[in-house]
Amino acid sequence: MTQSTNVRAAIVGSTGYGGVELIRLLAAHPNVTVTSVVSSSAAGTLFSEGFPHLTEIVTDTLDAVDPELIRGKADVVFLATPHGVSAKLAPDFLEAGLKVIDLSGDFRLKDPATYKEWYKKDAPDQAYLDLAVYGMSELFGEEVSGAKFVSNPGCFPTATTLGLYPAVQAGWIDPDSIVIDSKTGVSGSGRGLNLSAHFSEVNENFKAYKVGQHQHTPEIEMVLSRAAGRPVTTTFTTHLVPMTRGIMSTMYAALTDRSRTSEDFTQLYRQFYEGRRFVRVRPTGTYPATKEVYGSNYCDIGLNVDARTGRITIISVIDNLVKGAAGQAIQNLNLMMGWDEALGLRFTPVYP
């Protein structure tokens, strides 16, 4: 059933890249009004002081993190906060009767020990881990519909699992053979000061990071295990490239039937994602680039079977700040509210 429109939204962590992107996208949403922008570090200052591009667009003063104050101003809260912060805030907002969409990694993993191993922090209370619905819209949209608490997927897991899920679920590739090679733009590390994000460190450079340690690894394996119906482990390596936005995941896996062709996989993927407007499967023999989804909520996928090696190469691209964060969060809100999932997200990529 379609729920009422004119939903009031608060954005906690509004001064980070994910929060600012939420503000940009929600400004075009016909059913949502941003009524509170929240920052623990800059409360009381004008939002546009930190983001002059929003002068006369966002005229609000930043609110402090106060669940009772926000409860009087909002119906839904987006938590665009660092890992470890949402774990402390989400329960208070839920108890205040607000719907919550968390963009951090705090509630994605359901096992506290796994969370602590990869995030190096204590996990939230198990009751809230169980309550949070994992919001990969294209895969688990039915679970998101009507939920009051959604954990938004990570950027790398979004590109990667959308690229792998149909083939794993169909049994067309060997899950134990999967190798994932992912590249991201600098905005993925956030707006905070970080030596690795300095211009002179990134410009004309290309490097691997968090090799064998990236916190998105267990999230990817969680989703692929669900597709396979058994535990799956992968080799996942991330790289930083000198661009602002974008993720490209290039994935390799062994075929379970070497007679299957690239066209077979293209048809499988088109059938799997039929009706899902934000996944575009490229024609056989063509492959996506990050620029072709820039600023949009699309995930583009290209596939190639190498008959010589008996392996498939899957290339998946997204904008890490949109489909990998704010756009998918709004897609989840639409499903939570019973609206068309594309509401407020029907815009084309920015090109060139």
Image (cartoon, grey):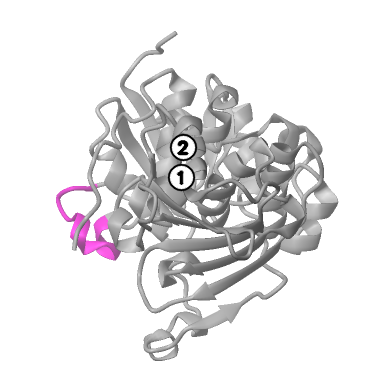
Q: What residue did someone put label 1 on?
A: 263
The quarter of the image holding the C terminus is bottom left
- Which residue is drawn at the image coordinates 61% and 30% (left, top)? 94
Locate residue 213, reporting x and y percent. Answer: 71, 70
Res 15 seen here: no
Locate residue 159, reporting x and y percent. Answer: 50, 52
The quarter of the image holding the N terminus is top left
Task: Tell me the crowding category of disc 2: few under 14, some 14 to 19, or many 20 or more residues within 10 angstroms, Cα based.
Answer: few
Q: Nearer the viewer, residue 260 or 8?
A: 260
Locate residue 224, reporting x and y percent. Answer: 69, 45
- Residue furthest to the right: 113
Q: Which portion, as a residue range, is magenta?
A: 48-59
Tag count: 2
**Residue 95 in the image: above or below residue 88:** above
Residue type of the residue flagged with mark 1: Glu
Q: Residue 267 carries which label?
A: 2
Q: Which mark is residue 315?
A: none
Locate residue 173, reporting x and y percent. Answer: 67, 48
Res 279 seen here: yes
Dividing the picture into quadrants, the one containing residue 15 is bottom left
Queried whether the magenta region covers residue 55, the answer comes back as: yes
Q: Which of 253 and 220 is in front in this view?
A: 253
- Which residue is drawn at the image coordinates 14% and 50% (left, top)? 56
**Residue 69 in the image: above or below residue 309:** above
Looking at the rendered structure, the secondary structure element under dot 2 is: helix
